Image: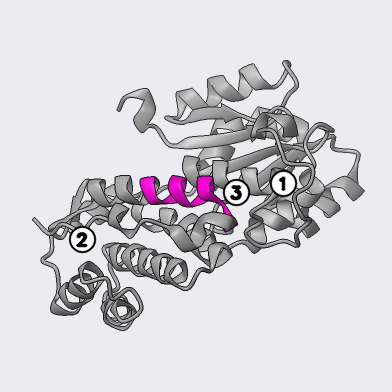
Amino acid sequence: MNEKEKPIIVGFVADLMFTPQIAKAATAVGFQMVWVETAADIGDVDPTAPRETPGEMLHGREGLLFQKITHWQPTLLLFDLTNQAIPWFGWLPALKSSPATRRIPIIAFGPHEDVALFQTAKSRGADAVYARSRFFADLPAILQKHARLPDHEAVNTACEQPLPDLACEGIALFNQGEYYRCHDALEEAWRQDQTPGRSLYQGILQYGIALYQLQRGNYRGAVKMLLRLRQWLEPLPPVCRGVNVARLRDNIQTVSETVQNSGEAGVMSFDFSLVQPIEVL
């Protein structure tokens, strides 16, 4: 496995005493680290953007946070509770309240004597909080315990199965531009399938909903669905049940970038010729 294929852990850690230890442990057990040391590392923000409540925030630094996290699709988020350059008090509940990111485990660490800090982090959304000494003593095991890793063998086995009739029907409707009507067939295909291959139908279904929202001129609804659907398609191989997933992911990326670059003002003029048909090989 090359470096780009390793699952990602995002570390919201800035202390140079901690980052080398975490990076070494993560590498040893097969992960790669992405560091966000300060809130500014997420990107520049528009000071005139409106404030929002938790969920998929589309504006400000929280909006950039969601874009980054959904792009990286990390297996784990790691917060240093003493890192005052990261507003974890607000980011934890935002990440845990969003359908796009709430399945990603969040762990945190801090000084063992600050019980109130631990309780606050848990109440804000951390799945586990460790005393700093315990965290670094058992670091590789803790990372492996909490990381959310797909079962690639099960996914690949499921993707070798044929595409069922309901999914074929949904994809055909999608390719006809019937983004609303394709929902029912794909949802039923998802309901009838209990294997990891069902994620394929969920991803296509949510892409269809995003495009339907674009047809209605609903910028916020479209962007939210485009953020959410990445988690379903990302674990799949390039081809799953005959569907060219690699091409589909690339097309979703193109559409997402175009929509976000155009903003709310440009949603009514979205060029639907950018949407490629879903290819079944």
Kindly report which numbered mark, 1 or 2, lies closer to the viewer in this rendering. 1
Q: CA distance from mark 2 to mark 3?
A: 29 Å
Closer-to-camera residue (224/122): 224
Extreme residue toward the front, this view? 269
Earlier sequence position, callout 2 versus callout 3: 3
Q: CA distance from mark 1 to mark 2?
A: 40 Å
The residue identified by callout 3 is 66
Residue at (77%, 44%) from the top-left corner?
88
Residue 108 appears in the rendering? yes
Given the image, on which type of amino acid does mark 2 rest? Ala
The residue identified by callout 2 is 158
Please, what is the dominant secondary structure of the magenta stretch?
helix
Closer-to-camera residue (91/15): 91
Task: State the image quarter where residue 131 is shown.
Answer: top right
Residue at (62%, 17%) from the top-left corner?
20
Earlier sequence position, callout 3 versus callout 1: 1
Query: Does residue 79 belong to the magenta stretch?
Result: no
Q: In the image, is residue 35 above or below residue 16?
A: below
The residue identified by callout 1 is 60
Given the image, on which type of amino acid does mark 3 rest? Phe
Q: Which quadrant of the figure contains the C terminus?
A: bottom left
Closer-to-camera residue (239/125): 239
Q: In the image, is residue 107 above or below residue 223?
A: above
Q: Which stretch appears magenta?
A: 254-264
Given the image, on which type of amino acid does mark 1 rest? Gly
Which type of secondary structure does the marked residue at label 2 adopt? helix
Q: In the image, is residue 219 above or below residue 115?
A: below
Residue 143 rendering spot, x and y as whole percentages: 55, 38
